């Protein structure tokens, strides 16, 4: 059985859609708490134009802070999202451990997100990914809108599989399928991942589900059964792509970890540390946040006497 990895995207995907800018010192506090939980990867920001996405304006500063030896979290990979060469150069300059980059299977979403068609973006991403690998960095490439698009509707799976084949041909093994619009449903998830693994059983496949229509955790289970072992989620279920038709939060990290705890798969991850970050975020944003377990607590152990 493959080891399960949890990839926390809250500091990036979770916060990017929030209108109220979270100060850098607050982000540092939350990231430190998340790193103590035993989560494997934390995506702490994206290297984008700060005028277009001001919530991410301190990404370079965050990476520089966490690359000081006294601040570097132990046993945690610090990831950053990049969309273009300028962003990649910024990330290389400030010590990103793993670069996340990808293209949308939807031309409409791709144009809104990057200003490029899917094919144009794919050429850019492959060149960027190779450059990052040559620099000794980890790289995860993705296919966004892999299960459907809020603008175009159904995305032919052949289009997704074609992008993945091109990634594999270029030498990439870490690949994520993102349900950007939240359209995925479990049988579709199993079918698509099963076909992906026909391209290569040695691929490290990740899932990135949004809970737009309430099927996030069901899709997680379907992906797990299909052999996926990297799961992206956001504390408190925050997030959503600002360039899709209906934006909604990610699968909630506390719910995901609680699920794997109950499956006996990742009991080493401290659920309480993640819940603490969610409580702090709820106080900061002054509202009840999505997700379940941070409100109910984990299922209690019943002792039979």
Image (cartoon, rainbow, N blue to C red):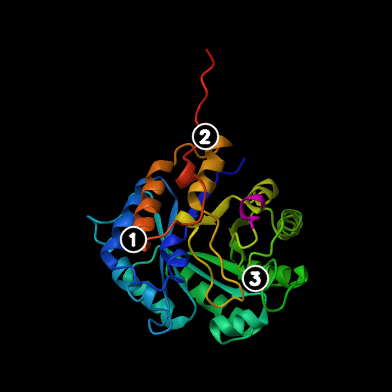
| Residue assigned mark 3 | 145
Closer to the eye: label 3 or 1: 1
Q: How crowded is mark 3: few (under 14 residues within 10 Å), some or many (20 or more)?
A: many
Q: Residue furthest front?
A: 287
Q: Quick check: marks 3 and 2 in contact, CB under 8 Å?
A: no
Mark pair 3, 2: CA separation: 33 Å
- Label 3 vs label 1: CA separation? 31 Å
Which residue matches tag 2?
Answer: 299
Q: Position of residue 78 (x, y in %)?
A: 39, 60
Q: Do the residues labelled 2 and 1 touch (CB within 8 Å)?
A: no
Q: Which residue lies furthest to the left in this view?
A: 70
Give the alpha-carbon distance from disc 2 to disc 1, as whole Å.
Answer: 27 Å
Query: Tag on residue 284?
Result: 1
Q: Where is residue 54 in the image (x, y as percent from the top left)?
A: 38, 78
Q: What element carries label 1?
A: helix
Question: What secondary structure is found at the residue carrying circle 3?
Answer: loop
- Above or below, 231 against 103 in this view is above
Q: Which residue is drawn at 66% across and 53% down?
A: 219
Looking at the rendering, the stretch of residues picked out in magenta corresponds to 214-218
Q: Which mark is residue 13?
A: none
Mark 3 and mark 2 lie on one chain; the one further toward the N terminus is 3
Image spot of residue 237 (x, y percent)? 50, 57
Q: Does the magenta stretch include residue 103?
A: no
């Amino acid at each position: 059985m493959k080891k399960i990895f949890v990839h926390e995207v809250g500091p990036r995907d979770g916060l990017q859609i929030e209108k109220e800018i979270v100060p850098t010192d607050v982000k540092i506090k939350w990231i430190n708490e998340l790193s103590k939980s035993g989560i494997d990867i934390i995506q702490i920001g994206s290297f984008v134009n700060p005028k277009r996405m001001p919530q991410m304006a301190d990404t370079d500063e965050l990476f520089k802070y966490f690359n000081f030896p006294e601040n570097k979290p132990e046993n945690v990979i610090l990831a950053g999202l990049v969309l273009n060469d300028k962003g990649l150069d910024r990330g290389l300059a400030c010590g990103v451990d793993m670069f996340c980059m990808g293209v949308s299977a939807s031309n409409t979403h791709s144009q809104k997100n990057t200003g490029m068609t899917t094919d144009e973006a794919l050429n850019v991403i492959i060149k960027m990914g190779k450059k990052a690998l040559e620099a000794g960095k980890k790289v995860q490439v993705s296919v966004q809108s892999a299960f459907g698009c809020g603008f175009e509707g159904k995305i032919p799976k052949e289009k997704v599989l074609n992008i993945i084949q091109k990634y594999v041909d270029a030498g990439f093994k870490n690949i994520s399928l993102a349900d950007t619009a939240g359209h995925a449903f479990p049988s579709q998830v199993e079918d698509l991942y099963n076909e992906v693994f026909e391209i290569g059983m040695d691929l490290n496949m990740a899932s990135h589900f949004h809970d737009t229509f309430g099927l996030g955790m069901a899709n997680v289970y379907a992906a797990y059964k299909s052999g996926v072992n990297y799961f992206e989620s956001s504390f408190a279920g925050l997030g959503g792509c600002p360039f899709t038709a209906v934006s909604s939060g990610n699968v909630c990290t506390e719910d995901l970890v609680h699920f794997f705890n109950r499956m006996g798969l990742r009991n080493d991850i401290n659920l309480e540390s993640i819940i603490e970050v969610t409580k702090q975020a709820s106080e900061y944003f002054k509202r009840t946040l999505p997700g379940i377990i941070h409100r109910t607590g984990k299922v209690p152990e019943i002792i039979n006497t």
